[in-house]
Image: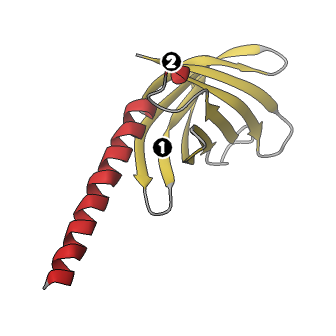
């Protein structure tokens, strides 16, 4: 009986911890990110992150949403993120059904909730799956 009780307490504690971490990542990531994508030319980039989950056991989160360049070409994405050494590393994968689909590899400027992360900035790269297109990405969260 005592072992069962201790196991139950441990599971409740883990669940609360997991919920708190998920909320932290949701608060930081979910929403509208605006900025630019630079290749041969600079274009407006919009990233909308709609859902975020985080698994404390694997220490990997999932993200879904969409991106749009110059207000058009809305493209859905799904991705993952890790939180290591105080920084978020994010990979967002477009579906691959269009010849210009690709993958974002971006990171936070600082850990969620830190002064370094204000304003909330994500920087990184986007590459087409064909590797023919490579662009720099910089977006700031719109509050």
Element type at marker 2? loop
Density class for disc 2 (Cα within 10 Å; few <14, some 14-19, many ≥20) is some
Residue at 69% in and 25% down: 137
- The quadrant of the image that shows the C terminus is top left
Residue at 31% in and 60% down: 14
Side (left or right) of 39 relative to 97: right
Location of residue 107 (image quadrant): top right
Residue at 47% in and 32% down: 112
Q: Which residue is under mark 2?
A: 118
Residue closest to the far left: 1
Q: Mark 2 or mark 1: name the one nearer the start of the chain.
A: 1
Q: Is residue 18 above or below residue 42?
A: below
Coloring basis for residues? secondary structure
Q: Is residue 31 above or below residue 81?
A: above
Residue at 50% in and 18% down: 118
Side (left or right) of 10 relative to 74: left
Element type at marker 1? strand
* Whole-percent x, y for residue 60 in the image: 52, 54
Residue 64: which numbered mark, if any?
Answer: 1
Residue 120 visible, this angle = no
Tell me the mark number nearer the camera, choosing from 2 and 1.
2
Q: CA distance from mark 2 to mark 1?
A: 23 Å
* Whole-percent x, y for residue 135 in the image: 78, 28
- The quadrant of the image that shows the N terminus is bottom left
Q: Nearer the viewer, residue 102 or 11?
A: 11
* Whole-percent x, y for residue 64 in the image: 48, 43
């Amino acid at each position: 009986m005592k072992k069962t009780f201790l196991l139950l307490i441990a599971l409740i504690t883990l669940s609360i911890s997991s919920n708190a971490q998920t909320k932290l990542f949701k608060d930081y990531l979910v929403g509208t990110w605006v900025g630019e994508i630079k290749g041969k030319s600079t274009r407006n980039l919009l990233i909308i992150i709609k859902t975020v989950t985080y698994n404390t056991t694997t220490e990997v989160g999932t993200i879904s949403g969409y991106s749009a360049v110059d207000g058009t070409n809305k493209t859905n994405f799904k991705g993952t993120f890790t939180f290591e050494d105080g920084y978020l590393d994010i990979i967002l994968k477009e579906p691959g059904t269009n010849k210009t689909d690709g993958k974002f590899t971006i990171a936070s400027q600082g850990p969620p909730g830190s002064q370094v992360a204000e304003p909330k900035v994500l920087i990184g790269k986007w590459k087409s799956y064909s590797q023919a297109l490579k662009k720099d990405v910089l977006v700031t969260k719109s509050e």
